[in-house]
Image (cartoon, helix red, strand yellow):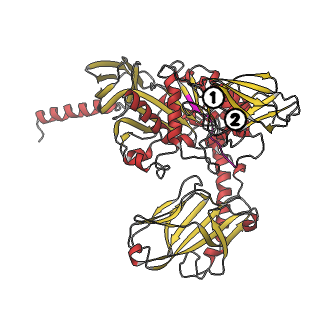
Amino acid sequence: MISRTNKTIGLFFLIVFIQSSVFAAIRLPKLISSGMVLQRDKPIKIWGWADAGEKVEVLFNGKKFNANTGTGGKWQLTLPAMKAGGPETMVVKGSNVIRLEDILIGDVWLCSGQSNMELTMNTARKKYQKEIADANNNKIRQFAVKQQWSFHQQEDLEPSAWKSVTPANVLEFTAVGYFFALEVNGKYGIPIGLINNAVGGTPAEAWMSEDGLRSFPYLQKQALLYKDPNEVDKVKKTDEGRRKVWFDQVRSTDKGLATNDKWYDHKIDFSSWSSFSIPNLWSSDILSNKGGVVWFKRTILLTKEQALKPAYIELGNIDEQDSTYINGTLVGTGSNKYQPRKYNLPKGVLKEGDNIITVRVIDTEPPGGFILNKSYQLVLGEEIIPLNGLWKYKIGAEVPPLRNNTFINFSVKPTVWYNGKIAPILDYQFKGVLWYQGEANVHKAKEYHTLFPAMIKNWREKFDQGDFPFLFVQLANLGASDSLPSDDALARLREAQATALSVANTGMAVAHDIGEWDDIHPMNKKEVGRRLFRSAERVAYHAAGAFATGPVFKSMVKQDQQFLIFFDNVGSGLVSKGKELRHFAIAGEDGKFVWAKAEVKSANSVSVEFGSVKNPIYVRYAWSRNPERANLYDSNQLPVAAFRTDNLEQ
């Protein structure tokens, strides 16, 4: 028989359990977590969620702060502005207790845009091996925002964490952001927090809110259309079906998989296959402007000692999907043509004698193959065996191309990344923005003249932190250089980017001299970070003598048989990298540009001779897709930005 006392105790614990179950646990946004960097010298918002009416207490820096949860389930409070410092501990109390450790106060920079901002130190590891090995700095941290797109504003981010700089952690850092942070921390000694919030292949409109697109009705209309989940599901189902049919056809018709003697087998005879020089993109005579599968093979002779060494293989960048085998064993696969292929080899895969490397490449649409100027090698301990040169190849399947531009890619539609990755962090204070984007808008340069400033305005309105510094990278050179003056969409996009300098508190890092002609993702991110820092010195840190960008065109006057071009932001003066200036072009009313002789005349001016052109009226400088020969700089080694004095249509 149960005693009255036991009944009373049981009832007490039941009531306590019910009461504790009534209140949902308080929770914090993913960004507010241990190891975070809070913005110095600004009031700091701390927010989270709990049941309506629940009281929340925050203990930080020896003080208590209180908030009541609103009817919508969100609570928020504000900490006073603080000087740089830390580490600190934060305790958040409600129906449960959350303890956050190792919090620093410093400068927070939001790093956003496309893949050149997203590009990690790991991707650039071959160029920056020493920098990675030396990476130990607890005062530089990054929060990498996971991919999350939506046509509806999201409340919070996907799970992630703040990480400080170590040789292992830095591999995940945005390379541009990291080198920028090194510069700021190195000069000012303050903690730096990077919010890595970039996505490859995304246009500016994907980072804008729905109301921010009101001046661009056709973009706003797209955002509204796909807010209907039924419309999205319908398109997804159709596109996924088409892709499945194509890849099923490729697999079923691939001769390399159709027989008992699979072509990845190291025992098959491939001596009669055709030859192909790697690296290279295959021409139309291989797949006749179609899609399909091409198999590649090469033999490498190894000694017993070599075969026993730890090994990996690098196959540069492949357009576009590969399965790589060694001696019949699959050692790696890849599907992104922008991602370098590096596959660690399992122990025992290599053997003494002949080793057969097989690469099966699937290309959905031409051209396909192996990107030039990348690393193709077998690495055995400290020994490197080059894989450049002649390989054998054979076509496995040839089918009509799967044209990517016929699919609806929701991840590039208006508002999707604003909703997924910007809206959840609108209450987080920061110092400024680092922005590297534009490639996805390159064929709409005219629109970008107004779209880009509108995006900056949109963010400033939504973040409600005033006219915070907004620093951006002007697109790098790409493609073959021109022997004659030319016009190009990339040159016009750079011009559109530069117009944003008229917006308050903006700065631009020129990069038309540090790209790679055959890679949209150049590896020299260290110099990009340095140039962004030079802009930050003026716009964010108000250093004496600093400029928001390098030299820019100011004015032009005719004088005898030459033009005098004047520049702003020249620092200690203009200089020519080389004996004579290159990449100046002039034209008359016919708009036919020819190269012109030019020279530095003074600290802030350049003369451009008329030459054989009668009545010239226009001047252009570095106006091409790849102006790699342009060599006008200031004394700080910052290149003069490309410009034109005409407004001719392309």
Q: Quadrant of residue 298?
A: bottom right
Residue 199 appears in the figure: no
Q: CB of mark 1 within 8 Å of CB of mark 2? A: no
State the SS at label 1.
loop
Q: Nearer the viewer, residue 448 or 247?
A: 448
> Badge 2 is on which residue?
493
Please provide percent x and percent y for residue 217: 72, 28
The residue located at (86%, 31%) in the rendering is: 588
Vertical comparison of 576 with 555: above or below = below
Pointer 2 local density, CA inside 10 Å: few below 14, some 14–19, many at least 20: many
The residue located at (70%, 32%) in the rendering is: 599
Residue range in magenta is: 471-480
Please provide percent x and percent y for residue 5: 11, 33
Q: Quadrant of residue 66?
A: top left
Q: Nearer the viewer, residue 531 or 69?
A: 531
Q: Is residue 479 magenta?
A: yes
Say whether residue 628 is left or right of residue 384.
Answer: right
Q: Which mark, by number, is residue 497?
A: none
Residue 492 appears in the figure: yes
Q: Amino acid at mark 1?
A: Glu
> Badge 1 is on which residue?
210
Q: Main secondary structure of the magenta part?
A: loop
State the SS at label 2.
helix
Vertical comparison of 321 with 452: above or below = below
Q: Nearer the viewer, residue 496 or 551?
A: 551
